Amino acid sequence: MNENSGLFNWNVFDDIPSDKFIYIRWIGNTCDSLVREIDDKEQVIHPITFFIGSNEPANRIRIHNFVRENPLYYKKTLEKIIHTDIKGFIFTFDWYFVFRDIVEIANAKGISTILIPHEGVFSSEEQYYKDREYGYNFPICKFCLLWGELQRKIFIRRGHAGIGLMLVGAPKFEKIFKLQLDKKVSKENSYLLVLQNMDCQILQKEAVEFQNKLIQFMCFYTIAQNKRLVIRNPPNNINMIPNSIKKDYIDINECISDFDGDNAIDAIMASSVVISINSTMLLEAKLCKKIAISVTNENIDNIWSDYDIETVFTLSELETRLNSIDKVYVEHSSISELLKIDFGLNFESPRASIRKFLIGMLNDTHSNYDY
């Protein structure tokens, strides 16, 4: 176990404030960024680094393997270092067994646990919020501040009693509604291709192969059309662009680049058409009044066609659609009521609501909230 001693900061709980919630950092561009957006001045949330180097995929794999191979040691150590002076924990997911143990121990010691999901449903309801290795598929945090009705329905259907489930809206989308969006029509279309890990797909290998074909097609298409293409890798820092495609297309063409920023909205706003298999950035693009196209097939779980996101089922259909694009502005009214309800788009200020709830918890006035 000594070789893995550098994966955990076992002493981090020794010196933490007792008047704030504790958040354990994990991935900078997803989980951590959500917490920063909610409490950027760290007034109610105190981030700590318990998992060392967790922003790097290789280190996350090492952490995963260590906990899986040493479950008793991990749990017993957590039981020793998680003390009752801790006011509470903030999590952005608790289905993953590495975090599940922390939640279980905190709950057993009477420490508050609060879930603020960093991601919504994007492939299928069946595959959402699930640890395939251990079977965990609904939250056990005492309080769950959910986006919208879809998350609540899924969790209750899977066995959650419903107590502590609270709808606050999607903080991930709040920035979009505050932007002064440019409604002008662009004369030249530029494309943003959003890649995914495909780890939520049942047929993961087939899904990755299809995405690779989509990458190659978009490279070939934009070169032929003399358009600009930006390819965005997943925010967990895992490269999904095959080396052969990078060598044959991206490295030798100035019109193709990979997006090196961590702000999804910046990437969307710099483009006129957003293309992906089933990323939630399609919904963000639609909210930003951009053309959003989901590219899928019969082997891929996809929910967006149910929510009025434009969907094509072959690369040939995609080519036909791209050839027909003559404007980039899409009326915001095209967002359906079902989409607003299921994804929490009808809440005005999710971040403020979350902060208000957390402050109430810190001041022991949370009993005023109706769950």
Image: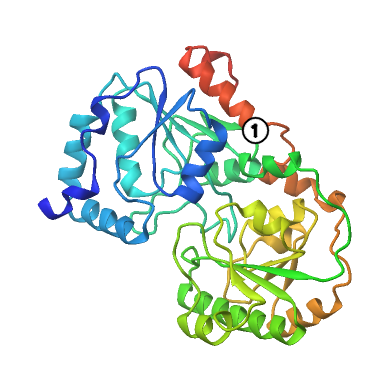
Q: Position of residue 29 (x, y in %)?
A: 50, 50
Residue 89 vs residue 186, the one in the foreground: 186
On the image, the x and y values in percent for residue 74 come to 20, 43
- Between residues 35 and 263, which one lies in front from this camera angle? 263
Q: 10 above or below 308? A: above
Taking the spot 54% from the left edge, 80% from the top edge, the residue there is 251
- Disc 1, SS: helix
Residue 336 against residue 363 in the figure, above or below: below
Say if 164 sits above or below 257 in the image: above
User: Can residue 371 be seen here?
Assistant: no
Name the residue beneath numbered marker 1: 350
Please state, as top left, top right, bottom left or bottom right, where the C terminus lies in the image: top right
The residue closer to the viewer here, 248 or 364, is 248
Relative to 306, 84 lies left or right? left
Residue farthest left in this picture: 2
Q: Residue at x 49, y 71 (%)?
A: 240
Q: Is residue 307 left or right of residue 38?
A: right
Q: Is residue 86 left or right of residue 354?
A: left
Residue 271 x %, y %: 73, 63
Name the spot of residue 89 as percent of width and height, x first.
39, 30
Q: Residue at x 41, y 47 (%)?
A: 95
- Three-letter residue code for mark 1: Pro
